[in-house]
Structure formats: C-alpha cells, structure tokens
Image: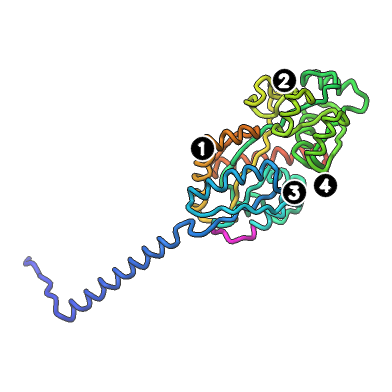
Amino acid sequence: MGLRFFTATPSTMHVLIRSCRFLFISFCIAFSGASNAQYPNKPIRMILSTAPGGGADVTARLIAPRLGESLGQSVIVENRPGASGMIAGEYVARQPGDGYTVLLDITTHVVNPGLYPKMPYEPIRDLVPVTQIIQAPNVLVVHPSLAVSSVKELIELARAKAGGLAYASSGNGSSQHLAAEMFRQRTGVEMIHVPYKGGGPALADVVAGQVPVFFAFLSSAAPHIRAGKLRALAVTGNRRAPSLPEVPTVAEAGLAGYEIYDFNGLFVPAGTPPDAINRLQRDVARALALPEVRERLAALGAEPVGSTPQAFESFLRTEIAKWARVVREAGIKID
C-alpha cells in the first residue's frame, strides 16, 4: 500500500488559518473569563446573628481582617441580631449562592430546630456549613453561700431540698437553660428555672446571691471565680479548660457522657460553589492558626477549631438531634 500525502491548496490553507485563529481567540477569551471570575473578586459580607459586643462579635471582628488578608478582599462584618438568630439566618439563606455573603452563627443554629416547629429556612440544607470557628465550654457555678463544693454535693443538696434548687439562664431556650435541663435529666433532680433577658443580668443576680446556680459562659464567669464571688464546680467540655485547670469536667465529676460546648461557625447560602466553600474554610483555618488569634481566643475561654465542611456538618447533625431530644423531654415551649 503506498503512502498518500495531503497537499493543501491556497483555499484550504485559508480555512485552516481562520480556524486556528478562531481557536486561539476562543482560548484567550475563556482564559480571561476564568481569571476574572476567580473567587473572590469583590468584598465579602459577614452577617452576624448576634448584637455587637458579645463573644461571637469579638470572634467575627478578630477573624474578618485576617480572612480578608488571605482572600485579598475586604470582609465586612454586619450585625443582624434577633429572633434567636433567625433574622440573620433567613437573610443569608435568601442571598445568591456566590460566596460573597456568609453567615456567622452560634449555638442557637442547632437548638432552634428543636424549639421552633416552623423555621423560615432549613439550617443545613439552606445554609451550607463551611467551618466551625470556635468552641467554648460553659462552667457550672454556684454562689459561695451555697454549701457545696462539688457536683456530687450539688446533686445531694438538690435532692434534699423541697421543690428543688433554682438556676438562672439568659432566657427560655438559651444554651444555659438547655445545659441545666440536660443536667436535670441526667441526675433526676428537681430544679427551678429562672430565665433572664440576657446572660449579663443572669450573671449579676447569681453573683449577688439572688439565684444560687448558673451554667455560665466561661469568659464572663472567670473573673468572678478568681475573685471568690462565684464557686466553680465543673466545666461542661470533654476536657478541662486551660484557664481553670483545677476545675474538673462534669463527666469527671460523675456524669459520664455529659458534654456541652457553645460554638460559632461559618455558613453560606445553598448553591455556593465548592471551590468558594473550600477556599473560605482553608483561610479561616489559617487565621485561627495565628498565635495572636489563638491567644485572644484563649483569653475569651474559647478554643479554635477550623474544621472541614464535612466534619462541621456531621457535628451539626449530632447537635441538632441531641438538643431536640433535650427540648422534647423537658417539654420546653417558646412563648
């Protein structure tokens, strides 16, 4: 069989040149479009579900500028508190899934599904988990006038006291309320709930001796513990708090499996591209690894996490189921 050679005529060469020119221009346009569409190419809004000044607000304003440096774009923090975090949650859930509006939410994200039969959004389906930012244990404290120095003695006193001991919380359905209800369910003791409009007023009345028991935020209670105005019986995490190393965990004190952390984390609207989600997660984790960030969080009684989207989603599903069970067994209703 002989070889056959292709001989280009002038008209054929003209067609080939035009085709190559078209392919080259198309490649350049595609490459330019990919470069222009690289995430992020404009500022990012971080919507916060709590009011200015609280622990989550401090965390957001600590992370935002460092996240902005990594991303090469400004990260603007905007507070939208109210309705147990659902005002901010609904707002972000309705935004385009492009990675330019993110939500920083707190523990209410996993408590609300058990408290509210009808929510304006689905916490995991409509708000995709990006990363858990921090976790912080609560601390079980009592007023020094209460004659107990351990969890065991507190349980014995509650069982002996007619009507049970009173405990404070920052409100009906709050993390402190649920922490106490979980404690009550595990021990079988009677306790009387005294809700306040916020953690500050609750802590003030416990320090004043108006209510004897409180599952307090560690950062808020620590100064009063050191000053002898409150007595710490246990922390609610799975290990001792570095700021209170002498205080055992609730599990160490005899309630195996009792573990509660307040947390905050980052979410994006459904439909956000995986590349944007992974970029946000990596850069948040990078910010949390900075020594000055870790030191500031430690001063707040918080531990940096920076988990993957998959690990964070698994954590959220476990927490939602746990708190739904506590709410159901306690018969908690929101007015």
Query: Which label's residue is closer to the chain start, 3 or 2?
Result: 3
Mark 2 surroundings: few (<14), some (14-19) or many (≥20) residues within 10 A: some
Q: Which residue is mark 4?
A: 334
In this rendered view, identify the residue nearer to me: 218 or 133: 218
The residue lying furthest to the left in this view is 2
Given this view, does label 2 or label 1 mark the residue nearer the observer?
1
Q: Which residues are magenta?
A: 93-98
Q: CA distance from mark 3 to mark 2?
A: 32 Å
Front: mark 1 or 4: 1
Return the residue found at the far right.
162
Residue 116, numbered label: none
At label 1, the amino acid type is Leu
Give the image's coloring scheme: rainbow
Q: In terms of sequence position, does the residue under pointer 1 or pointer 3 come before the other?
A: 3
Report which residue position mark 1 lands on. 290
> On residue 84, which mark appears?
3
Q: Which mark is residue 253?
A: 2
Helix, strand or loop at label 2? It is: loop
